[in-house]
Every structure is written in C-alpha cells, then in structure tokens.
Amino acid sequence: ISPQSVTCLLLGQMVEETLQGTGFEVDLAQQIGVAMTLTFYAGVVISLFGALNLCFLLNFISKSVLSGFISASAIIAAASTAKSLLGLHVKKSPILYILVQRTIAELSHIHWPTALISVAGISFLVVMPFIQKRARRRLTAIHHPLARGLCMVMRVPPVLYLMALGMLLGSILCSFQPFTEWQVE
C-alpha cells in the first residue's frame, strides 16, 4: 500500500464505471484503452494547473480534510487488499461497507496457504526494520571490513528481501523460471 494505491483504486473504479453496461466490462484491451485515456486527461489537467500557476488553490484545502482523505484512502486500500491477502473470491463493490460485509461472509472459505504467506510477509516487513536497526548498531561498533559490508546489507529495504524471497519460493514451488525469456504466443 502506497500513496499511489489511492490513485490506482480511483482509476480502476472510473474504468469500471465507464465500461459498465457497454459489453466491454471483461475486455482487457478496452480497459487498458480507457485507463490510458483517463490518465492522459489527468496529466493534461495537472499540466494546465502548473502552467496557469494554480497551485495556490491547494492552500484552501484544510489539513483536517487532507488527513481525513488520507485516512479514508488507507482504509479503502486495506479493505480492497484484505480479500486477496486471505485468498478469498469476493465480488467487487465501490461501497466500502458492502465490500466488508461480503468479505466477512466469505471468511469461512479462507485459503490458508495464501493467508499464512500474507501474514508471514507482513510480519517480516514489520519486524525487519527493528532487526536491521539493532544489527547496524552492533556492527558499527566492530571495526572490521566484513562488519562494514554487513552494515551496508542492513540498509537494504526489507521489501527487496521479501521480493527476492518471493521470486525464489515461486521458482521452487511453481516451477517458475524468473530469469528466462518469456515466450508470447
């Protein structure tokens, strides 16, 4: 979950609403086309704001409104992600409480391997910065070239360790070959 996730959620919702009732709801090419068009229009509007020096308008948005928007965005992103983290198949809904109700109704169908991997990954991302900070403190007290190298390794963001571990596990468990050229038919 990042600041861009809110933009992606909004864009996905706009694409769904644009294609709803047209018969192209499941057509990936149409979805990509609509997403690219909406992204282009957003870029035009942002460019116009910059060219016309309208950034002063942001001063009229209070900090409490921004804080509420960010908090609500985090809740929506977490609710949208929870079903995937638990391995549930839940029908999408643009209304948060309906999505939460559907997710709760499906809790008896949790895919336990997916949920276990999700909890382990989140736990790793939460605990690893504390381990890195403690290890860096201890390694800086040791004056040895190997300790300096390990101290540099301890500065790598935990998400990169998690990505490498995911690729390794994926290649072992799923016979996925991450470093070979994909054949597109």
Image (spheres, helix red, strand yellow):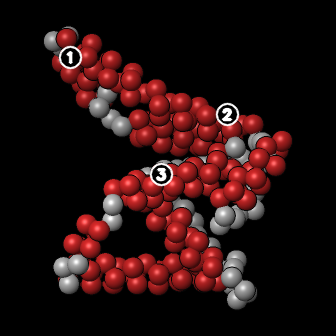
The three-letter amino acid code for the residue at tag 1 is Thr
Q: Nearer the viewer, residue 52 or 153?
A: 52
Residue at 33% over, 35% down: 156
- Within 10 angstroms of label 2, few (less than 14), some, or many (20 or more) residues? few
Residue 39 has which mark? none
Q: Nearer the viewer, residue 108 or 177?
A: 108
Residue 131 visible from this viewpoint: yes
Residue at 51% over, 72% down: 11
63 shown above or below 162: below
Residue at 77% over, 47% down: 104
Disc 1 to disc 3, C-alpha distance? 38 Å
* Local SS, label 1: helix
- The residue at which mark 2 appears reads as 116
Label 3 close to label 2 by CB (< 8 Å)? no
* Local SS, label 2: helix
Q: Nearer the viewer, mark 1 or mark 3?
A: 3
**In the image, residue 159 lies at what x, y percent?**
43, 40
**In the image, residue 181 lies at what x, y percent?**
50, 60
87 shown above or below 35: above
- The residue at which mark 1 appears reads as 140
Count every numbered label the image shows and give the total. Answer: 3
- Within 10 angstroms of label 3, few (less than 14), some, or many (20 or more) residues? few
Q: Nearer the viewer, residue 175 or 79?
A: 79
- The residue at which mark 3 appears reads as 71
Disc 3 to disc 2, C-alpha distance? 27 Å
**Left or right of residue 118: residue 146:** left
- Within 10 angstroms of label 1, few (less than 14), some, or many (20 or more) residues? few
**In the image, residue 29 lies at what x, y percent?**
59, 81
Label 2 close to label 1 by CB (< 8 Å)? no
Residue at 47% over, 31% down: 126
130 shown above or below 73: above
| Quadrant (top left/top right/bottom left/bottom right) for the C terminus | bottom right
